[in-house]
Amino acid sequence: MKIKKFLILILCAAMLLSGCTIVEEILFAATEELLSNNYGETYEDYQDSENYNDFVSSGELEVWFIDVGQGDSALIISPEGKTMLIDCGEYENIDAVTGFLDKKGIDTIDVVIVSHPPTDHMGGMATIFWDYEIKSVYMPYASANTTAFEKMMEAIDEEGLTINEAQEGVSLDLGSVHAEMFG
């Protein structure tokens, strides 16, 4: 039964990566159920706890869905500690993401994925690029004429990062975890 729930969670994560926001409530319900079953606490208990490090990496795959309001944000941590951040929500909610990353002790993000340019997915991304060491960035060939998009592109340039095109067939290696982008 545990495997079935995990596979459903991974399917939902894949839908999230492809820009499908309908699954947000399913993701939070699945995350809450997994936390409840595995750690004896609900997502709300964990979110309100003073010490996020109660859930220090256990050497297993971790998938976290960060509550950023209207948008999406997910953090994947491989058993080896490699990290992937997918989106970050609006600028107004970036503290939820940076607070979570900081309390997990993350200062380097191996892969950042910007799923698409609307600000509910990438509004605070400039902060991520400025405040953390980023090893690689993936985003689709798309643009927007918003201040948030312009700041994100400025941050990418200032940090000397190269944008890799997020497209079907791109493979990402996070140690023992292999991820592939689907169209």
Image (cartoon, helix red, strand yellow):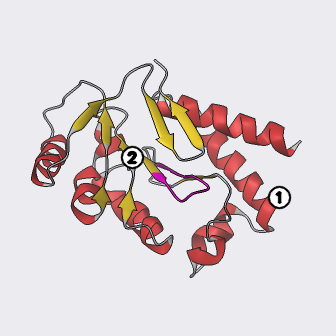
In terms of depth relative to the viewer, which is nearer, 159 or 41? 159
Disc 1 residue type (three-letter): Asn
| Residue 64 spot, x, y in % from top left | 57, 54
Quick one: label 2, few (<14), some, or many (20+) residues within 10 Å? Answer: many
Q: Name the residue under label 2.
A: 111
Q: Residue at x 32, y 50 (%)?
A: 90
**Helix, strand or loop for disc 2:** strand
Magenta stretch contains residue 77: yes
Query: In which quadrant of the rendered image does the N terminus lie?
Result: top right
**Which residue is farthest right?**
1
Disc 2 residue type (three-letter): Val
Q: Residue at x 37, y 67 (%)?
A: 107
Measured in 3D between alpha carbons, the distance from the residue under mark 2 to the one under mark 1, in whole angstroms, is: 29 Å
Which is more N-terminal, label 1 or label 2? Answer: 1
| Residue 121 spot, x, y in % from top left | 36, 41
Q: In this view, does 141 lie to the left or right of 73?
A: left
Relative to 182, does residue 96 appear above or below in the rendering?
below
Examine the image and state in which quarter residue 97 appears.
bottom left
| Residue 171 spot, x, y in % from top left | 46, 29
Q: Which mark is residue 37?
A: 1
Q: In this view, does 61 lie to the left or right of 159?
A: right
Residue interval drawn in magenta: 74-83
